[in-house]
Image: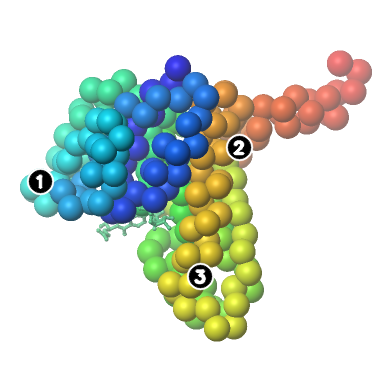
Amino acid sequence: MKNIVILISGRGSNMQAIVNAQIAGAQIAAVISNRPDAGGLAWAAERGIETAVLDHKQFADRESFDLALANLVDSYSPDLLVLAGFMRILTAGFVNRYSNRLINVHPSLLPAFTGLNTHQRAIDEGVKLAGCTVHFVTAELDHGPMIAQAAVPVLDDDTAETLAARILVQEHQLYPQAVAWFVADQLQVVDGKVKLAAQVRADIAVRAPSI
Ligand SMILES: Nc1nc2c(c(=O)[nH]1)N[C@@H](CN(C=O)c1ccc(C(=O)N[C@@H](CCC(=O)O)C(=O)O)cc1)CN2
Ligand SMILES: NCC(=O)N[C@@H]1O[C@H](COP(=O)([O-])[O-])[C@@H](O)[C@H]1O
């Protein structure tokens, strides 16, 4: 059984999708928010999942918040730390504690549109495809090794809200799948890129057919 801790900042719809997926081999140890008013906290608590709040506004700086957050997270002995609508940029010190076991879902087709307001920026740029990316988190914002992506069309009459809603449907399918791959040890980071274990075996077979 792998322990999963999920960090949220708001409604937590991706957290809900992961919980509802009832992933074999996964146990949601806790849901933690940096915002006391995060709607996802009540949703998780109503389902018997342990919740906690660490209000970033109560800390003098990012480093002290991240240190307290790491101590809280580590109290649940996570095998995997999942960012699900978590809206704080994490320090290198925090990220490096969870190398290759810290993931995030970002609402764009990375490397396009890192940061915030991705939907409006995609519309403003006139792109015809948008989507979401699940990736390992590194110190450099939204630049970690990508695990999976899903694309949706951008329609002429899209608003940021309509595009966000279309992408969210894909997030709710993609993120639980990515978590399930991690829990089943199907993910490997090779030269900074993520390969599914089966694909890694296939790649080796192609390069060395004599094996
Ligand atoms: N070191 C990293 N930290 C985080 C990453 C990452 O890849 N590396 N991913 C983000 C998630 N994210 C986009 O997917 C993201 C979240 C928050 C922000 C941001 O600018 N936050 C502001 C506050 C915004 C707010 O409170 O509404 C801030 O932290 O000052 C950008 C991108 C999670 N962290
Ligand atoms: N940069 C992080 C970011 O923008 N994350 C995005 O927040 C939305 C709400 O998530 P939620 O419904 O799971 O709380 C989701 O679209 C997620 O991709």
Q: Is residue 112 visible?
A: no
Q: What number is the disc on residue 163?
A: 3
Residue type at tag 3? Leu
Judged from the image, the secondary structure of the residue bearing numbered disc 3 is helix
Residue type at tag 1? Phe
Q: Quadrant of ligand 1?
A: bottom left
Judged from the image, the secondary structure of the residue bearing numbered disc 2 is strand
Q: Nearer the viewer, residue 14 or 119?
A: 14
Residue type at tag 2? Val
Per the image, the residue denoted by label 2 is: 194
Q: Is residue 77 above or below residue 60?
A: above
Q: How packed is label 2: few (under 14 Cα within 10 Å), some, or many (20 or more)?
A: many
Which quadrant of the figure contains the N terminus? top left
Where is residue 85 shown, x and y percent of the image? 36, 51
Q: Is residue 125 above or below residue 29?
A: below
**Mark 1 or mark 2, earlier in chain:** 1
Q: In this rendering, would 70 be left or right of 78?
A: left
Distance (Cα) linking label 1 and label 2: 35 Å
Q: Residue furthest front?
A: 46
Q: How packed is label 3: few (under 14 Cα within 10 Å), some, or many (20 or more)?
A: many
Q: Residue at x 20, y 28 (%)?
A: 71
Per the image, the residue denoted by label 1 is: 59
Q: Residue furthest right?
A: 210
Mark nearer the viewer, 1 or 3: 3
Q: How packed is label 1: few (under 14 Cα within 10 Å), some, or many (20 or more)?
A: few
Where is residue 47 shown, x and y percent of the image? 30, 35
Instruction: Give the image quarter of residue 6.
Output: top left
Distance (Cα) linking label 1 and label 3: 35 Å
